Structure formats: C-alpha cells, structure tokens
Image (cartoon, coloured by chain):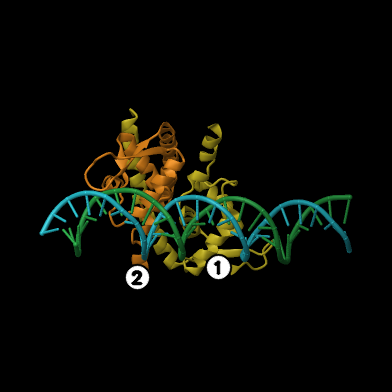
Chain colours: A yellow, B orange, C green, D cyan
Amino acid sequence: MVKDQDLFCNGKSHKMERFLEVCLLLLLYDELGYGYGLIEQLEDFGFSQEDLNVSTLYRTLRKMEKENLVSSFWEEGGPGPRRRIYEITDIGKENLDQWVRILQIRKARIEKLINRYSVKTGE
Amino acid sequence: MVKDQDLFCNGKSHKMERFLEVCLLLLLYDELGYGYGLIEQLEDFGFSQEDLNVSTLYRTLRKMEKENLVSSFWEEGGPGPRRRIYEITDIGKENLDQWVRILQIRKARIEKLINRYSVKTGE
DNA sequence: TAGACTATATACATGATGCACATAGATGTG
DNA sequence: CACATCTATGTGCATCATGTATATAGTCTA
C-alpha cells in the first residue's frame, strides 16, 4: 500500500506533456543557451536535477531545431568541450506565444477540476 | 504557414497527460456512471464531443478497474443495450486526492511560466 | 426486417518520455 | 606522460498515454 503511494508520488507524475519544450523556448527567448547549461536554468520551472532527463533535453532541442523553432551553431574557442549554442527563431517566438495560450486553457481546466473537488470535500 | 498554425491549434495540443483519468474519478466520486453516459458529463471539463476519443475513454476505464480505482458491474434490465456501470473505490478516492495535489503543482508551474512570459512581452 | 442508434471493446500506430549507454575533448593529478 | 574525471552531446531501446480504425452486438424505429 505504502509502496504504491510512493510510486505514485515519486515526482514522475508531475511531468506535463511538452512542458519542457515551452520552458526551453522561454529561456532561449531571453538569451542564447546550450544544452548542459540550460539544466540549471530549468530548475526555476520546477525541474529538479534528478527529475530532468538529460537525454530528453538534448533530444528535445534537436527536435525543436528540425521544426525551425530554434537554430544552433558550434561555439568558437570557449573553455572545455565545445558547446552547441541554441537561439530562438521568429517561428519559435510565434510558437511560444501559441503555447502560452494553450497553457492558459490547461490552467483553467485544472482550476475548474480543483474547485469542484474542494467543494465536494468540504473546502 | 497558416496550415502549420492550424495544425498546432487544432485542439489536440490541449490534451493533458492523464487528465481524463482524474476527471473520471471525480465524476464517479459523485455518482455511478457508465462509459457512453460519461461522455456528456466530460464536456464540463473541457472535453468536446469531437475531441474526446471513445476508445480512450473505455480503455481508460478498464485500466482504472485493473488498478482497483473503480469497480464495475453489468446493469440489470435497463433500456437499450446493456451498460457496464462503474463505481469509485476507496483506493480510487485516495488516488483522486493525490491527483488533485499533483494538479495543484502543475497549475503553479504553468502560472509561473505564464507570468514570466507576460512580464517579457510587456504585460 | 432493415437501418440507425447505443454501448463496449480490441488491434495497430504514433508521439513523448525514461533508462542505459556511447562518444569525445578538456582538465587535473600522480 | 598516463590516467581518471568532468563537461558536453548524442543514440538505441523500452514504456506509457493516446489516436485511428475497426469489430461486435443488442435495441429501437420506420
């Protein structure tokens, strides 16, 4: 019983479909970024270091580039291993705008459900 | 360009992971229900008739029963084809409670992102 | 009795994500 | 110099939730 609850509340259920993608767009809207470096910045959006899957991060960035939401280039002469620097495109900015609208709808739907539940359980 | 936008905003992107499941738990928390009949009630939670996938609905209910979140029985002597009536279990109620907590976290994360975006775009 | 409607369900495909592992250059240490 | 460690990027396979298409079967109505 306790085991199942633990499993259920282990943080994996907190994931939201394509939320990472939107966060990345917003971060890159501010400034250039590269995969490994974005990990820290993602903590602000509720992604813990353990939570966040590095493979998913890189895969997502590559996918976003295929869809022309971001573009990338190799950093010249920085310290350490070379970095692929990402930059948001105009299409990416439009896309972000649409995502925010979608998230507003999601938020409203969640709010409605929470309210209906709290009414039932006696506020 | 317009085609891509249409594709992006066609409602499919409004889906939220396992949100249907939580809505079903809440509806069955109120009263007994059966698959086909629940479709109408789901409109309250932002599922349009077109949107909502009947296969997904039935599949989800069966899955929930396997996990002992709901139990079911065949209706006796009602009108029309026989209905499988679903009922929430105690485990289902606990589960719903946990889901609501998760949704509160999701909501907070979405809010934070929306706020950061609107600050950037000039409120 | 033929067709439409109600109702439930399965088979196959897709898309997002997680886990494990591969690669490779940079840096530090004995 | 040799070796381990850290930074950084990526791929292959598995899983999970969902969508599409289709199957089945009883009921109601013209």
Task: Say what secondary structure mark 1 lies in.
Answer: strand
| Residue A1: x %, y % from top left | 53, 32
Query: According to the image, label 2 marks what residue?
Result: B3
Instruction: Residue at 52% x, 45% y: name it.
Output: A12
Which residue type does callout 1 highlight?
Ser
User: Which of the numbered marks, if any, corresponds to residue A72?
Assistant: 1
User: Which of the numbered marks, if any, corresponds to residue B63?
Assistant: none
Instruction: Residue at 40% x, 33% y: name it.
Output: B89
Answer whether residue A35 is visible to the viewer in this image.
yes
- Residue D23, quarter of picture: bottom left
Can you name the residue that lies furthest to the top here? A122
Q: Residues within 10 Å of mark 2 (few under 14, many from 20)?
A: few
> B65 or B11: which is nearer to us?
B65
Number of dots carrying numbers: 2
Q: Are marks 2 and 1 on the same chain?
A: no
Q: Are marks 2 and 1 in contact (CB under 8 Å)?
A: no
Instruction: Residue at 40% x, 48% y: name it.
Output: B60
- Asked if residue A66 lies left or right of residue A117, the reply is right
Instruction: Residue at 23% x, 47% y: name it.
Output: B80
Q: Residues within 10 Å of mark 1 (few under 14, many from 20)?
A: some
- Residue B84, quarter of picture: top left
- Asked if residue B3 lies left or right of residue C2, the reply is right
